[in-house]
Image (cartoon, rainbow, N blue to C red):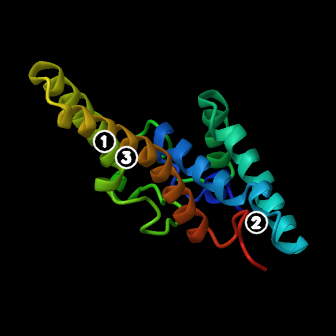
Amino acid sequence: MAGDTHYDVLGVEPVIDAAHLRKAYVGLARKYHPDFHTAGPPEARAHAESRMRAVNAAWEVLGSPQARAKYDKDMQGKGRLHESGPGRSPSNASTAHYRAPDKTSGTAPPRWLTMLPALCLILTVACFAIGMVTGLAVMFAGAIGLALVGGLLFAFVPMVALKRASRSAPDGPTARV
């Protein structure tokens, strides 16, 4: 890692824009933050701390437009960086890309499940309004039932998301050693 550029540490190309650079930093910070490696062996925590220091050092330079421009100029002078840096239009711009950190698919709950609590709320309001206009007790009962189901779903859906995320993070705080 000693010979790597800050771009190498963050896993991006030098032509990356600021928004994607930040995404790369945040993704690596989530991956290597030492707080997510407390359950693992001491070697894993030490590795994570070392990587996090390198990621933070790279972000400290590349996250600032002025510091990044100076860094790019210094690295180009040393021949360690291509002439195509931020703000330049290289001939191979189509090959420059942001390499996102690996994500485990299936960690988020299904879209329909995340929309269900809001749908229950809308139906609750509709049943209550119809019950007010018509005076039907069954509509009021339906509104109360939907409100209860919606309230439970508002608590249940985030728990599902957290459980799925903890299962997909092998080196996360819930990892088994």
Q: Residue at x 24, y 31 (%)?
A: 140
Q: Position of residue 62 (x, y in %)?
A: 63, 40
Tell whether label 1 touches label 2 (CB within 8 Å). no
Element assignment for label 1: helix
Q: Which residue is mark 2?
A: 1
Q: Which residue is mark 1?
A: 146
Q: How many numbered marks appear?
A: 3
In the picture, which quadrant includes the N terminus? bottom right
Element assignment for label 3: helix
Looking at the image, residue 16 sits to the left or right of residue 35; the answer is: left
Task: Tell me which corner region of the image, top left, top right, bottom left or bottom right, holds residue 46.
Answer: bottom right
Q: CA–CA distance between discs 1 and 3?
A: 5 Å
Q: CA–CA distance between discs 3 and 2?
A: 53 Å
Q: Position of residue 44 (x, y in %)?
A: 82, 71
Q: Position of residue 150 (x, y in %)?
A: 37, 42
Q: Position of residue 86 (x, y in %)?
A: 49, 40
Q: Is residue 99 visible?
A: yes
In this view, the residue farthest toward the left is: 134
Q: Residue at x 56, y 57 (%)?
A: 162
Residue in front for this viewpoint, 166 or 87: 166
Tell whether label 3 touches label 1 (CB within 8 Å). yes
Q: CA–CA distance between discs 2 and 1?
A: 56 Å
Q: Which residue is mark 3?
A: 149
Vertical arrangement, residue 109 with respect to residue 125, above or below: below
Give neighbour class at mark 3: few <14, some 14-19, many 20+ (Cα, 10 Å). Answer: some
Element assignment for label 2: loop
